[in-house]
Image (cartoon, rainbow, N blue to C red):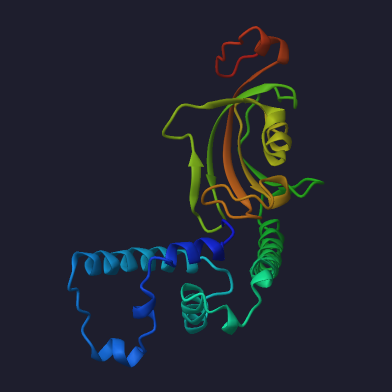
């Protein structure tokens, strides 16, 4: 998640009418908004736009939902430039937000890693699941009899990737196989595919430290365990790759 910026939120909210913001909740409930001029209508429409944008941004704040009454109170003070009544010094605004975000991120990371540990401990007890020294878990779905790739080789594979909750984040099954140099992908793939013979199909359970770690990649959240079904179709040596090696399934120059 992108870091929430209070400054951006306040800039967006600057279009809100300060006089309207000062109305009490009772006044708002009991009185009908009057839009007498085109400027009134535009002002109200801008308020709706900004409110929707802010609502979406604020929903992403970790540890939420936020205290709306305090947020609105601070917003009103900022719009009115009522600095004398700020509850937090202007010079401390960024540090307050950043420290909060950092602590919440640490809590979320600790929770995710604890859940990962439980998942991997249970998963390795399943029949057929093997574990390497690095913590990579895998099971053989189909055993091929071709050669095994080295880290410096180029491979051609079909794959299907999911998260532990079953969410599919990427797949080549409805597309063409992909080709890549084995030492230029995530560590879990570099290690795992070297266990495979051409013609094999394995399922890999890749711990976050062998995947994307703390990085966020689309639907892949930080510290996610990645589950891949991978079929190894072909392997090419570095020399063959330099010469424009034409992949032909299940063949390799010896």
Q: Nearer the viewer, residue 149 or 6?
A: 6
Please say if 90 is above or below 132: below
Q: Nearer the viewer, residue 67 or 64?
A: 67
Can see residue 146? no
Please say if 208 is above or below 6: above
As drawn, which residue projects farthest toward the top? 243
Image point 28% across, 69% down: which residue? 44
Q: Position of residue 177 (x, y in %)?
A: 51, 27
As drawn, which residue projects farthest toward the right? 133
Which quarter of the figure has residue 243?
A: top right
Q: Position of residue 175 (x, y in %)?
A: 43, 30
Image point 42% across, 68% down: which residue? 55
Q: Position of residue 167 (x, y in %)?
A: 49, 53
The answer to whether residue 160 is left or right of residue 24 is right
Quadrant containing the C terminus is top right
As drawn, which residue projects farthest toward the left? 36
Which quarter of the figure has residue 52?
A: bottom left
Q: Position of residue 21 (x, y in %)?
A: 38, 79
Quadrant containing the N terminus is bottom right
Image point 70% across, 56% down: which residue? 124
Q: How many marks?
A: 0
Image point 57% across, 15% down: which residue? 247
Can see residue 243? yes
Q: Nearer the viewer, residue 61 or 154?
A: 61
Please say if 136 is above or below 110: above
């Amino acid at each position: 998640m992108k870091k929430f910026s209070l400054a951006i939120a306040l800039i967006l909210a600057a279009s809100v009418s300060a006089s309207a913001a000062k109305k009490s909740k009772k006044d708002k409930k009991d009185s009908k908004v009057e839009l007498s001029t085109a400027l009134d209508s535009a002002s109200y429409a801008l308020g709706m736009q900004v409110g929707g944008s802010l609502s979406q941004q604020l929903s992403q704040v970790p540890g939420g939902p936020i205290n709306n009454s305090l947020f609105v109170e601070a917003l009103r003070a900022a719009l009115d430039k009522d600095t004398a009544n700020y509850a937090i010094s202007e010079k401390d605004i960024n540090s307050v937000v950043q420290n909060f975000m950092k602590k919440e991120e640490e809590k979320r990371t600790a929770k995710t890693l604890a859940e990962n540990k439980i998942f991997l401990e249970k998963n390795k007890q399943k029949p057929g699941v093997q574990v390497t020294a690095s913590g990579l878990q895998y099971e053989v779905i189909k055993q091929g009899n071709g050669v095994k790739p080295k880290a410096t080789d180029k491979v051609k594979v079909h794959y299907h990737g999911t998260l532990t909750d079953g969410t599919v984040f990427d797949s080549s099954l409805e597309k063409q196989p992909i080709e890549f140099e084995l030492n230029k992908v995530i560590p879990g793939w570099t290690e795992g595919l070297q266990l495979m013979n051409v013609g094999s199909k394995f399922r890999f359970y890749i711990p976050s430290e062998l995947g994307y770690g703390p990085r966020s990649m689309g639907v892949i959240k930080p510290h996610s365990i990645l589950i891949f079904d991978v079929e190894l179709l072909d392997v090419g040596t570095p020399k063959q790759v330099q010469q424009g090696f034409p992949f032909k399934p299940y063949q390799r120059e010896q």
